[in-house]
Amino acid sequence: QVQPVESGGGLVQDGGSLRLSCTYSRGTFTVYSMGWFRQAPGKEREFVAAISRAGDYTAYEDSVKDRFIVSRDNARNTVYLQMNGLKPDDTAVYYCAASTISFPLPKTASLYDAWGRGTQVTVSS
């Protein structure tokens, strides 16, 4: 596919968990660092997490680093975002993105080349 495809969003209660998945099959998956971003209504898109090509380095936005875990399965061309301890402030559309930049891990949206359409995550209080 020409763009990443996200899945796994939904409605969850405060304190709950969700796991997002993103599959990207354009070219060789291991040439891409993969990132997750989110955008809440009325706000700018913000960085959430990123993972290196081999999965040996990760980066997180401060508000999620103790709750979210990014991982990847290169054999399945898939990156995951395990979200635990979800809060209403985590409500947003979550986007998966691919970047050819390997180091440092990109945290800026403009450094990503391909984007998914997003998946909605809603956390109720």
Image (tube, rainbow, N blue to C red):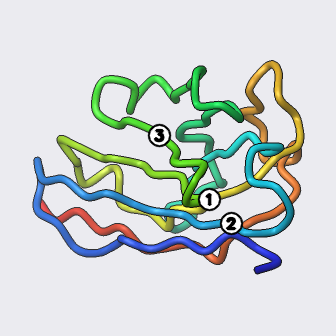
- Which quarter of the picture shows residue 76? bottom right
- State the residue in front, 2 or 29: 29
Q: Residues within 10 Å of mark 2 (few under 14, many from 20)?
A: many
- If the image is split into quadrants, where does the N terminus sit? bottom right
Query: Is residue 73 shown above or below 101?
Result: below
Inspect the image, locate mark 1, and give the three-letter code of the amino acid beneath it.
Asn
Q: Earlier in the sequence, mark 3 or mark 2?
A: 2
- If the image is split into quadrants, where does the C terminus sit? bottom left
Look at the numbered disc 2 and give the secondary structure of its residue. loop
Query: Is residue 23 shown above or below 52?
Result: below
Whole-percent x and y of residue 24?
A: 68, 66
Disc number for residue 50? none
Whole-percent x and y of residue 96?
A: 62, 59
Inspect the image, locate mark 3, and give the three-letter code of the amino acid beneath it.
Ser
Please tell me whether mark 2 or mark 1 is closer to you in this view: 1
Proximity of marks 2 and 1: CB atoms separated by less than 8 Å: yes
Residue found 32% across the figure and 57% down from its top: 19
The residue labelled by disc 3 is 71
The residue labelled by disc 2 is 24
Residue found 82% across the figure and 46% down from its top: 99
Inspect the image, locate mark 2, and give the three-letter code of the amino acid beneath it.
Tyr
Q: Residues within 10 Å of mark 1 (few under 14, many from 20)?
A: some
Whole-percent x and y of residue 108?
A: 78, 38
Look at the numbered disc 3 and give the secondary structure of its residue. strand
Question: What is the CA distance from the residue labelled 3 to the residue labelled 2?
Answer: 14 Å
Please tell me whether mark 3 or mark 1 is closer to you in this view: 1
Question: What is the CA distance from the residue labelled 3 to the residue labelled 1?
Answer: 11 Å
The residue labelled by disc 1 is 77
Residue found 86% across the figure and 63% down from its top: 27
In the image: residue 74, left or right of residue 24:
left
